[in-house]
Image: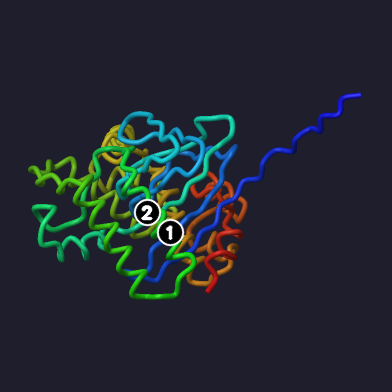
């Protein structure tokens, strides 16, 4: 008789919380083994430290591997995905600061970035043991300490160092073409009215494009075709509504999803957690 016991599959764990500093910053502490994130985007940056294992993810037109001890950097609104690069999965802690939160700090810098504004992080994976250690200290402090002075000091310090060591000033804006301005109209409509039941032809009319041309040009410019970008905009609205205390059912309806299960499916693929779990974790 085989005395070895069959090991049960490891459980996925993802815990979201919100730090009050800088008006509120989303935090994540997670262990993933089978999670496979679909391509998605966040309105904030992703700054994460791999604690165990390794993660493979898509960003900036290519695939990258982040092993234990490395730092993951994804810019705001940048399309990315993620899954395990090892059999044992991966664990990481991350924060999602918004561009205006980085701008608040960059305005106060006396040195470092040569211009104000939110930074651009060119490298998806960086190896910086000192900064990784400081990020871990920030995550631990935000989780365990109520000392506001300590929390703010450490957070400001690590964000400043991150910008100065690994960020670049935003590229000077080039002349925007007429086509880019037309595409921006479509993006702004989807951002402002994510729940709208609009057709591809109506969006194409807004941009003065043919439907076929709009799909190709929009994906090239923003990383998603219009219908996929609309889902991202709806997820952002649903997440905001849930954080404000709306039920998952109401959030699904208000953000334009067909039903609660439709929201559940897309939310889990993008966030690694169900909307119901998210609602319980961020409840104040």
Q: Position of residue 31 (x, y in %)?
A: 56, 46
Residue 139: image tag: 1
* Secondary structure category for the residue under label 2: helix
Distance of mark 2 from mark 1, alpha carbons? 6 Å
Q: Where's residue 74, x and y in %?
A: 33, 44
**Corner quadrant of residue 259:** bottom right
Q: Is residue 43 visible?
A: no
Label 2 crowding class (10 Å Cα cut-off): few <14, some 14-19, many 20+?
Answer: many
Cβ–Cβ under 8 Å for marks 2 and 1:
yes
Residue in the foreground of this view, choosing between 4 and 175:
4
Badge 1 local density, few (<14 within 10 Å), some, or many (20+)? many
Query: Residue 274, position in %: x, y?
Result: 59, 53
Which residue is at a point 25% across and 44% down the rendered structure image?
121
Q: How are the colours assigned in the image?
A: rainbow
Residue 127 to residue 112: above or below: above
- Say which residue appears at 30% left-offset and 68% top-offset: 153
Q: Residue at x 25, y 59 (%)?
A: 102
Q: Which residue is mark 2?
A: 135
């Amino acid at each position: 008789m085989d005395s070895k016991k069959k090991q049960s599959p490891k459980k996925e764990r993802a815990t979201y919380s919100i730090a009050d500093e800088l008006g509120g910053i989303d935090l994540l502490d997670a262990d993933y083994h089978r999670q496979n994130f679909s391509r998605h985007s966040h309105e904030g940056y992703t700054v994460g430290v791999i604690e165990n294992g390794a993660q493979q993810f898509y960003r900036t037109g290519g695939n990258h591997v982040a092993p234990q001890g490395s730092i993951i950097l994804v810019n705001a609104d940048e399309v990315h995905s993620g899954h395990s690069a090892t059999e044992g999965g991966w664990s990481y802690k991350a924060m999602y600061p918004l561009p205006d939160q980085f701008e608040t700090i960059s305005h106060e810098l006396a040195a470092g970035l040569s211009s104000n504004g939110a930074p651009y992080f060119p490298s998806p994976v960086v190896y910086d043991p000192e900064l990784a250690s400081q990020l871990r200290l920030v995550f631990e402090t935000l989780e365990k300490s109520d000392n506001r002075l300590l929390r703010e000091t450490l957070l400001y310090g690590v964000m400043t160092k991150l910008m100065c060591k690994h960020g670049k000033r935003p590229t000077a804006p080039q002349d925007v073409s007429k086509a880019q301005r037309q595409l921006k109209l479509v993006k702004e409509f989807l951002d402002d009215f994510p729940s709208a039941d609009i057709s591809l032809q109506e969006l194409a009319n807004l941009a003065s494009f043919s439907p076929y041309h709009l799909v190709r040009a929009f994906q090239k410019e923003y990383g998603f075709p219009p219908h996929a970008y609309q889902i991202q905009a709806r997820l952002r609205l649903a997440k905001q509504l849930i954080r404000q205390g709306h039920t998952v059912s109401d959030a699904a309806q208000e953000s334009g999803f067909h039903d609660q299960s439709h929201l559940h499916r897309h939310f889990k693929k993008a966030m690694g957690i169900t909307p119901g779990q998210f609602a319980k974790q961020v409840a104040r």
